[in-house]
Image (cartoon, grey):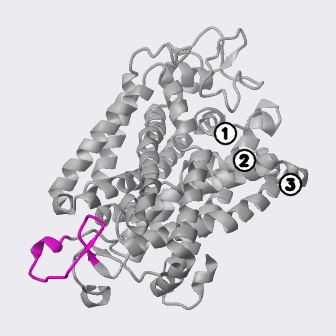
Amino acid sequence: MVKRSEIENEDISLDGNFLCDGKGGTVPYDRNNSSLHLKRDQWSSKLDFILACVGCAVGLGNIWRFPYLCYKNGGGAFLIPYIICLVTCGLPLFMMELALGQYMNIGSVETWARLIPAFKGVGIASFVVTFQMNIYYIIILAWAAYFLVMSFTSTLPWSHCNNEWNTERCFPQLNVTPNINASAVMVNVSTSDKNVDAVTEFWERKVLHISKGIDEPGSIVWELAISLLVVWILVYFCVCRGVRVSGKIVYFTALFPYLVLTILLIRGVTLDGASDGIYFYLKPDFSRLTDPQVWVDGGTQIFFSYVLATGIVTTLGSYNKYNNNFYRDSFIISAINSCTSFYGGFAVFSVLGFMAKEQNVTVGEVVKSGPGLVFIAYPKAITEMPLSPLWAIVFFFMILLVGFDSQFVDVEAFLAPIIDAFPQYLYRKRNRMILTAVYCLLSYLIGLTMLTEGGMYVFQIFDYYSASGLVLLWICFFEAIVVSWVFGINVLKIFFPVFAKEKNQHNLF
């Protein structure tokens, strides 16, 4: 057998201190055996890896979910359970997944299969979650792309009621809360006799063509189908050539959204009523800390924003060099992730405060979570700004970029276990490109089920069940049990300090 230190300059796949045979075992090292010289991608630089992790972790949840949870769960007081869950759950699990990927130097499924073969199901569960998440997450990007295209006009189409899709109940400047709420905005059609805001009719009748229920699927909304196709094509070209190429793309997709978010923040805080929105965002209500749901929301947000239990962190770590300091990287990525969530809240609530002032209602009446914020509340606020088409373009372009780098990193995490299972074929660029094209096409066809007139109900099923907090919680539970009690903490103490070349850092676990 041969040790890693003897062959660290060779382009071969490694498992621990031995060469990997691709089947979970090891083989003697033979320099004349060309079949072993199969190159697995690595990050071109340290910054590529950091930005890929940041781009994946800093997604739509940081912009539309964290601010809403802060408001809902006691404002500034919500930071207490959030930080506790980060320190006790998020950071250790993120560090563990990153370290395992870096040590095993292979995709998430085989990482768990080789660590403890009896628990390969942990890797398979993450693999299935990633497959389902990739199908429905990109639907949001298709909606955002459609909004972006519709923003290239002198007058935003959702700012008035003179469109063919509007009904007699449409009202362009509705000074009461629209006939929707945070949970119903995505699934309920406005069927009452009350007036309906123009942006709501645009969303329901023009974008979604939403039917009355899942039992009425209707036809495909072809505008959205084309939008989804374009997004999948862009994802394909980012992923098809491996992390050496996608690692360069994240320089733009991960960094530029911060510029756009800053522009929106500067514009937001200059609006009348912005201070009311920010106060509403941060006002602490410590009595909420006695509610168990607040702590559940804090933990769930950590799991979502740190993409735990999906195999993504493990896959990104597997492209690192063996001696990379993953301890330092974990703290850097975690700090950027959580600070972005907090920073994004100011940009969101400053605009919502302006919107509440314009409509003469409280901030709480215009606050919405999830797609209700991105596709209802924020577009409505934009219509009340000067140069509204410009700000609509800026906003939806940012949404696309924030979601885009998360999507192609997620796709890479799904493809990596397949590629690593057949290295003799799929480590070659041409075969990898074919596999990526087949996967993107298959995912696109499945995604069309969510772009029918009843597709929103299918989307809600995927969103609620495929990557729900309970699913991620159970996967993380078994990950911790396997690593700590089956694989053994004593073994971790042997391996982990070797990576960072620093003593006693394993105590962080």
- Identify the disc placed on residue 69: 2
Question: Residue 35: percent from the left, percent from the top?
Answer: 13, 71
Report if residue 284 lies within the magenta region.
no
Q: Which residue is the site of mark 3?
A: 284
Question: Disc count in the image?
Answer: 3
Q: Position of residue 149 (x, y in %)?
A: 43, 34
Q: CA distance from mark 1 to mark 3?
A: 19 Å
Residue occupying image coordinates x 53% and y 52%:
59
In this rendering, the answer to whether 362 lies above or below 209 is below
| One can see residue 31 in this view | yes
* Left or right of 62, for residue 398: left
Reply above or below: 315 against 269. below
Asked if 489 appears above or below 57 in the picture, the reply is: below
**In the displayed structure, does residue 330 sit left or right of residue 367?**
left
Decide: few, some or many residues near mark 3? Use Cα within 10 Å; few <14, some 14-19, many ≥20. Answer: some
| Depth check, front residue: 73 or 229 | 73
